[in-house]
Every structure is written in structure tokens, then in C-alpha cells.
Image: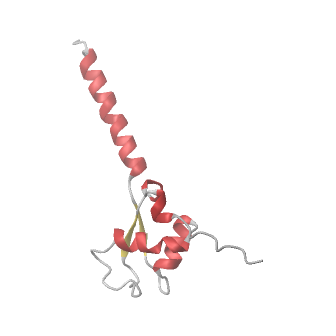
Amino acid sequence: MRRVGRPLVLLVGAAVLLAAIAAARADRVHVVRPGESLWRIAAAATGDATLWPLLYRANRDQIKDPSLLYPGQRLTIPDFDEIPAVAGASAPKPPKLD
């Protein structure tokens, strides 16, 4: 029986690890249902409906008008954790008037 060399074992292990990382980071897909909007989908995916423009940008290839979604459309839900904090930053609070 032929003995498997250490470099081959390391190569196979690295390939398995990279595949697992890629699967964990893969974007999700959302199938649009009747009555849904980017606002509603962003709220469900992130808890923050104001992130809908990021969802729109991630799907510009199939959304021509962000106010028109069609049932059955398959939208990519990007990994919102990878988006810079500035993109999802909330607006500053207005100053208090005494």
C-alpha cells in the first residue's frame, strides 16, 4: 500500500477548509413574494430597513426600479457584516433644544 505524503494531506485539508469558509460566507438568496419591497426584505434580513439601498445595489443587474419587485425574482442578500460601518450608520441625533 502506498503511503500518502504529508504535503498531499495538507493540500487536501486546506482545500476542505477553504470550501467551508466559502460556503459560510456565500451570499444568501431571497425569492420575492407578492407584496414585498426592498424595505421589507432589508428589515427581515438585517433588522434595519434603512439598509434597502445596499440590497438594491447588490441586485442592480435585475432590479431596474427599486420600487418594482416581481414575485419569483431571486435577490442576492449580501453579507451585511462585510459592509463598512459608514454605509449602515444611522443618522446623528438632532441637538436638544432647551
- Residue 45 is left or right of residue 84, and the answer is right
Image quadrant of residue 60?
Answer: bottom left
Indicate the position of residue 48 as horizontal and vertical percent values: 56, 69
Residue 71: x percent and y percent?
Answer: 41, 83
Would you place residue 40 above or below residue 9 in this image? Answer: below
Task: Choose between 97 and 40: the one closer to the eye.
Answer: 97
Q: Position of residue 79 (x, y in %)?
A: 43, 58
How many marks do you count on the picture?
A: 0
> Which residue is located at x 38 percent, y 71 percent?
75
Residue at the outermost left position = 2
Q: Residue at 39% of width from left, 58% of height from top?
A: 27
Identify whether 31 is placed above or below 23.
Answer: below
Question: Which residue shows up at 47% across the image and 82% down it?
Answer: 37
Q: Residue furthest right?
A: 98
In the rendered view, tell whether residue 60 sits above or below residue 28. below
Q: Along the horizontal axis of the image, is 97 left or right of 8?
A: right
Say which of 12 and 65 sits in front. Answer: 65
Seen in the picture, residue 10 relative to 37 is either above or below; the reply is above
Question: Residue at the spot x=44%, y=57% of the render?
Answer: 84
Instruction: Locate the N terminus by quadrant.
Output: top left
Task: Looking at this view, name the residue that lies furthest to the front.
Answer: 98
What is the x, y in percent for residue 47? 58, 67
Name the quarter where the C terminus is drawn: bottom right
Tell me the quarter of the picture where residue 19 sits.
Answer: top left
